[in-house]
Image: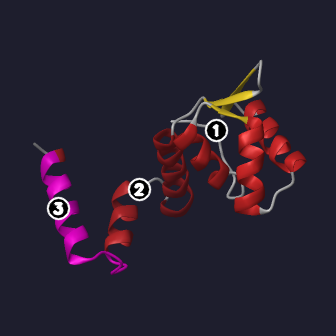
Amino acid sequence: MSCVKISEAEYPLMEYIWAHAPISASALAAYSLDAFNWKKNTTYTVIKRLTLRGALERQEPGFMVTPLVTKEQVQQSELERLCNRVFAGSSKDLVLSFLSSNSLSDEDLAEVKEVVKEFHR
């Protein structure tokens, strides 16, 4: 799956857009000022970059912004990039590495086991 790449700096803005779309650019600028201390021009530059890369659609009048990709599509694409880059494309090695990191609680591990069981039915 090939999807639009969203930088670390752009991702928090996209999260806000996904949660509030369609949203006006002026509302995004106000949010960005509070959340990131970005000036209006910085927000508009990021919106323009995301639009040119196909992540957003900019609609007139009112300069409304709507995402063209879902959060899940971006997450899946980033996961595939990570898997290919770090684990030579081995999903199994990625999952085993994650599970061996001891970062899962007992509840999380039980949920993962249930998902695996459901996936194989």
Query: What kind of element bears circle 1?
Result: loop
Q: Amino acid at mark 1?
A: Val
The type of residue carrying mark 2 is Ser
| Residue, disc 2 | 90
Q: Which residue is mark 1?
A: 4
Tell me, for residue 113, which label it has, or none.
3
**Colour style of the rendered protein structure:** secondary structure
Vertical comparison of 17 with 78: above or below:
above
Where disc 2 sits, the SS reads loop
Going 77% across and 19% down the picture, which residue do you hit? 60
Is residue 27 inside the magenta stretch? no
Q: Tell me where residue 49 sits by quadrant.
A: top right
Quadrant placement of the C terminus:
top left
In this view, the residue farthest toward the right is 41
Q: Give the mark nearest the N terminus, 3 or 2.
A: 2
Mark 3 belongs to which amino acid?
Lys
Q: Nearer the viewer, residue 60 or 58?
A: 60
Q: Which residues are magenta?
A: 100-118
